[in-house]
């Protein structure tokens, strides 16, 4: 079960990478962390940083958690205005019971 979940999460992470690459031109960095817990849960978090079309720094973070009783995913995008230093963050979390 956990192998199937991690495979699905990895595939979703790859799709998300493609979407980010299309949305943020220029060079960037990406970090992915996968963890598992002794009780059978797992999580994956991917953080991508790049430059948006307007020159602002853009950070996208996707987190997927699988627990025995529920699963959740959180997607957030933070954009930092290079001229004013202000930030804008959009975040969505979806949870499902098992």
Image (tube, grey):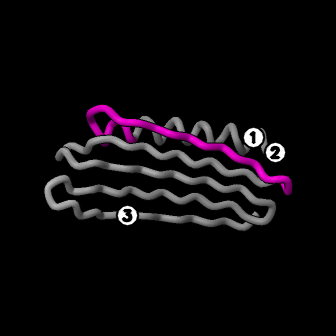
* SS for callout 2: loop
Residue at the spot 22% in from the left edge and 49% down from the top edge: 56
Q: Which residue is identified by label 2? A: 1
Dot in front, 1 or 3: 3
Query: Looking at the image, is mark 3 or mark 2 earlier in the sequence?
Result: 2
Query: Looking at the image, is mark 1 or mark 3 earlier in the sequence?
Result: 1
Residue at the spot 25% in from the left edge and 44% down from the top edge: 52
Label ID, residue 54: none
Q: Tell me where residue 78 appears, x and y as whole percent.
A: 35, 57
Which portion, as a residue range, is magenta? Answer: 20-39
Q: Residues within 10 Å of mark 3 (few under 14, many from 20)?
A: few
Q: Tell me where residue 51 appears, x and y as whole percent.
A: 27, 42
26 within the magenta span? yes
Q: CA distance from mark 3 to mark 2?
A: 32 Å
**Mark 2 in CB contact with mark 1 (< 8 angstroms):** yes
* SS for callout 3: strand
Above or below for 31 versus 66: above
Q: Which residue is identified by label 1? A: 4
Q: Residues within 10 Å of mark 1 (few under 14, many from 20)?
A: few
Above or below for 69 versus 51: below
Q: Which residue is identified by label 3? A: 90
């Amino acid at each position: 079960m956990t192998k199937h979940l991690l495979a699905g999460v990895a595939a979703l992470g790859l799709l998300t990478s493609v979407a980010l690459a299309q949305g943020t031109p220029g060079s960037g960095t990406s970090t992915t962390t996968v963890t598992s817990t002794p009780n059978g849960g797992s999580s994956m978090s991917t953080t991508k940083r790049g430059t948006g079309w307007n020159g602002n720094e853009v950070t996208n973070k996707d987190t997927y958690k699988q627990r025995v009783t529920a699963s959740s995913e959180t997607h957030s995008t933070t954009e930092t205005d290079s001229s004013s230093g202000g930030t804008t963050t959009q975040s969505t979390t979806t949870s499902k019971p098992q």
